[in-house]
Image (cartoon, helix red, strand yellow):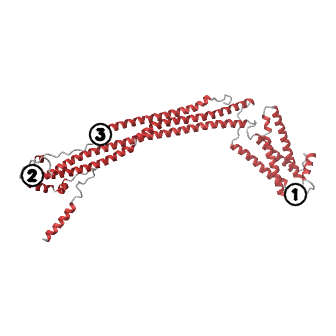
């Protein structure tokens, strides 16, 4: 007795563990299939069929389904409605994904933005052309001015322009001579200066600066006037040369005589040097004084020559040449910059249009995938309705077979007929085919627009570069300048 009770408890536990959690067969499909056995057990179809069959119910002449059969149909119809709800939810998801592709907005942007990009590109090229016209006129004026300058002064050679390195070398040469002269002068002048080395150094710095800088300025400005063809300016240049010689000789003789003045002399040293220069300027009593004079005068000549050759010897020619070269360089550099800018804009526009075309291809593939998925969903829903009809007939068979076996009277005529479930239609195949074809046509048109605009931008770039080069033909270079 206890053993039977234990087995009964285990059986109940096993039955509890084996009972399905719902009326559906386990699966991963969107539409879960009804479990015929579970529904039959839940509705007690076999027992109910036997009970009603023992009572010969329904009657043999019953025209339609009885209450039990209606319950089966209602259960299946309820499941059909649930499946239809799921189908609509899934369909809404697919439609939302289709709407998110937003083809129409992209088509509109492509039809408007692509031609606008070409127009903007041409406008940018036109602005650059206007800027180059201005720079080319500046260059032409500089060429004409340079040609007139060369013709007026009968110049054939090219102007000599000091480079930065050459200018640094010449300035460095002046600085080296200045330091050497200060060191040499300090040694000589300290012997005749009552303040010793400090006083000699102060005098040396003063005289060296005057000797080097003044000689350089004489060569840079007045002496270069000798190169001009005007007699008046040549006279001024000759006077400047004589003034320089007088200045250089007088300054260095002053230094030489100053060296010979002993520091113990009474009276004004300057007055003593002036008296010697006026009465016996060439009388130097010490050979070191002669060397002192020679070093200073040679340094003065070098500084003067450095001034003459610091730039082109012909006054104004180097500045004219620099102005002409600068205008040409500005024109050339700006032309190169404008071409590079147009090339960058062209490449960016091409990249954007190719990206838009690729985006359409990707979205079209996604569109096809969504339509395919939506079509499969409709097929699965149709198949699921067929499954529900078969399930309904299987459940009816369970009930009817149990009813037949328990009856004494003949079974109703409708027991031998299958139940035909009314289908929920989904007729979107024709519309989907039309939409797909229209989309393909629109994508093709948009891609053709993009390809045409890419080609148009390339043509605009070539025309812009050609127009930039034509500026030189419209404003030709001066023959004399060439």
Q: Is residue 127 left or right of residue 354?
A: right
Q: Is residue 9 left or right of residue 348?
A: left
Residue at numbered disc 2 = 404
Residue at numbered disc 1 = 194
- Which of the two residues, 466 or 308, is positioned nearer the viewer here? 466
Q: Residue at x 15, y 49 (%)?
A: 65
Alpha carbon separation for disc pair 2 and 3: 45 Å
Q: Position of residue 4 (x, y in %)?
A: 13, 68
Q: Is residue 214 left or right of residue 276?
A: left
Q: Residues within 10 Å of mark 3 (few under 14, many from 20)?
A: few
- Residue 127: name its quadrant: top right
Q: Residue at x 58, y 34 (%)?
A: 129
Assign a secondary structure to mark 1: loop
Q: Position of residue 166 (x, y in %)?
A: 70, 43
Q: Residues within 10 Å of mark 2 (few under 14, many from 20)?
A: many
- Which of the two residues, 239 or 382, is positioned nearer the viewer here? 382
Looking at the figure, which quarter contains the C terminus? Answer: top right
- In this view, the residue farthest toward the bottom is 2
Number of numbered discs = 3
Mark 1 vs mark 2, foreground winner is: 2
Chain-order first, disc 1 or disc 3:
1
Assign a secondary structure to mark 2: helix
Residue at numbered disc 3 = 429
Q: Residue at x 66, y 38 (%)?
A: 326
Chain-order first, disc 1 or disc 2:
1
Q: Position of residue 352 (x, y in %)?
A: 47, 40
């Amino acid at each position: 007795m206890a053993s039977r009770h234990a087995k009964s408890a285990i059986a109940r536990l096993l039955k509890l563990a084996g009972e399905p959690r719902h009326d559906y067969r386990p699966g991963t499909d969107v539409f879960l299939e009804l479990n015929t056995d579970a529904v039959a057990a839940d509705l007690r179809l076999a027992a109910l069929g036997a009970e009603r069959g023992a009572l010969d119910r329904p009657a043999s002449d019953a025209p339609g389904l009885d209450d039990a059969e209606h319950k089966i149909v209602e259960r299946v119809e309820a499941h059909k409605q649930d499946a239809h709800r799921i189908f609509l939810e899934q369909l809404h998801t697919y439609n939302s994904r289709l709407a998110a592709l937003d083809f129409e907005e992209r088509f509109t942007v492509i039809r408007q933005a692509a031609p606008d990009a070409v127009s903007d590109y041409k406008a940018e090229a036109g602005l650059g052309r206007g800027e180059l016209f201005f720079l080319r006129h500046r260059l032409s004026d500089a060429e004409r001015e340079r040609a007139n300058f060369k013709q007026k002064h009968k110049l054939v050679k090219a102007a000599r322009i000091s480079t930065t390195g050459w200018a640094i070398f010449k300035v460095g040469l002046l600085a080296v001579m200045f330091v050497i002269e200060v060191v040499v002068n300090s040694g000589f002048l300290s012997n005749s200066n009552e303040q010793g080395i400090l006083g000699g150094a102060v005098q040396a710095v003063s005289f060296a600066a005057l000797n080097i800088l003044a000689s350089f300025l004489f060569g840079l400005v007045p002496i270069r006037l000798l190169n001009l063809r005007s007699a008046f300016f040549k006279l001024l240049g000759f006077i400047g040369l004589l003034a320089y010689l007088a200045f250089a000789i007088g300054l260095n003789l002053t230094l030489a005589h100053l060296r010979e003045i002993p520091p113990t002399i009474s009276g004004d040293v300057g007055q003593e040097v002036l008296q010697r220069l006026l009465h016996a300027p060439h009388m130097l009593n010490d050979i070191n004084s002669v060397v002192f004079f020679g070093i200073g005068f040679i340094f003065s000549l070098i500084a003067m020559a450095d001034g003459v050759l610091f730039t082109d010897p012909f006054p104004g020619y180097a500045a004219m040449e620099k102005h002409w070269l600068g205008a040409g360089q500005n024109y050339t550099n700006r032309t190169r910059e404008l071409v590079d800018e147009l090339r960058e804009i062209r490449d960016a526009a091409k990249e954007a249009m190719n990206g838009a075309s690729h985006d359409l291809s990707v979205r079209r593939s996604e569109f096809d995938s969504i339509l395919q998925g939506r079509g499969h969903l409709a097929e699965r829903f149709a198949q699921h309705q067929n499954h529900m009809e078969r399930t309904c007939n299987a459940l009816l068979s369970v009930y009817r077979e149990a009813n037949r076996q328990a009856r004494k009277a003949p079974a109703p005529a409708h027991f031998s007929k299958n139940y035909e479930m009314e289908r929920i239609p989904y007729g979107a195949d024709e519309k989907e085919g039309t939409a797909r074809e229209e989309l393909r046509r629109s994508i093709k048109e948009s891609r053709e627009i993009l390809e045409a605009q890419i080609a148009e931008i390339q043509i605009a770039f070539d025309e812009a570069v050609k127009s930039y080069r034509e500026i030189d033909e419209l404003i030709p270079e001066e023959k004399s300048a060439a």
